Image: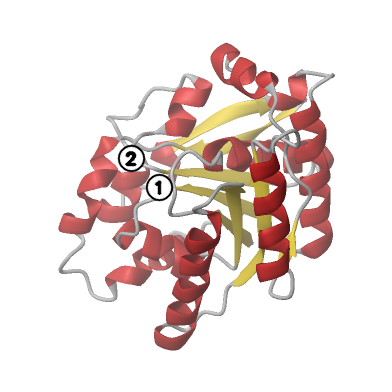
Amino acid sequence: MKTLLVTNIKGGVAKSSTAVAIATGLKLLKPESKVLLIDGDPQGSIKTYFGLKLQNSDKDFSSFLVEDTPFEDAIQKIPVGDSHIDVMISSRKLSEADIRMAAFHRREETLKGRFKKQNIQYDYCIIDSSPAMNLVLLNFMTFADYWLIPATMDAFAISNINYLFEQKKIIEEFYEKSPTILGIVPTMFDKRTTVSQQAYEAIKAKFGNKCRVFDPIGVDSTVKKAQIKKQLIYDFAESRAAEGYKNLTENLIGII
């Protein structure tokens, strides 16, 4: 199973939109693949995106992670093309996970243990994360083989990305894990502004020798239209963002 964490410690950088676009893009490009999308944010952005509600006695990702409830109880299916992907949604219960897991043995690797114990198998697992650097995010970092960093091109981009590279070193030093940072995805990129262009060039200069800096995903109103209408970005044929995310997903398939 190939596990990809979509992460940034800054909010509002299109992590959820990117995770959804990659998970559904993988299914469209490789229809035979089994794809799991995990909503790892207490705000439940993916739940809201698809208009989902908790089912099976309110079981969700938090129940699975903290209580070891059956994986299947938290799964919902989202139609993609002629098939579907599995989605494990979250709720605000996930914000309590740090406290509830405080006494767990090897608490930072709880998620890895849950997947192993319940023998959960997919071809791809895509994880959308909260910007909060907490125990839940640490579990994602010790679980995922690959990290992808969406980032808006602004004054805070470099320091936030630097922080994630520092966290990667900590994971490698203290845990039996060597995740690969696949690259940085400039999101909501406005090529008309000098600030965006300068930030993009600065990020390529700073991190280009450490990881890929993918082609930017431009500002596109169809991203919000897709969210409002509970549709996939790929349902909008003329969407520049859809084309950008398709190209990104094709690149990821080639890398991992």
* Figure check: 181 above or below 253: below
**Which residue is rendered at x = 34% and y = 59% of the image?**
133
Asked if the residues shown at circle 2 and circle 1 are in contact, with their CB atoms under 8 angstroms apart, the answer is yes
Q: Find disc 2 in the rendering and name its residue.
A: 42
Q: Nearer the viewer, residue 254 or 17?
A: 17
Q: Which one is earlier in the sequence, the residue at label 2 or at label 1?
A: 2
Give the number of the disc on residue 130.
1
* Foreground residue among 84 and 45: 45
SS class of the residue under badge 2? loop
| Amino acid type, callout 2 | Pro
Residue 82, relative to residue 145: is it above or below? above
Q: Amino acid at mark 1?
A: Ser
Q: Toward which corner of the image does residue 35 lie, by quadrant?
A: top right
From the image, state whether disc 2 or disc 1 is nearer to you.
1
Q: Which residue is found at the position 52% from the left and 51% from the top?
A: 155
- Residue that appears at 75% across and 33% down: 192
User: What x and y, as percent, mark residue 81?
Assistant: 76, 26
Instruction: Check the image and report above or below for 34 versus 202.
Output: above
Report crowding for label 2: few under 14, some 14 to 19, many 20 or more residues within 10 A (C-alpha). some
Q: In the rendered image of this protein, does residue 239 appear above or below residue 11?
A: above
As drawn, the residue found furthest toward the bottom would be 173
Quadrant in which the N terminus is drawn:
bottom right
Outermost residue toward the front in this view: 194
Q: Residue 237: x percent and y percent?
A: 83, 19
Residue 123 visible at all = no
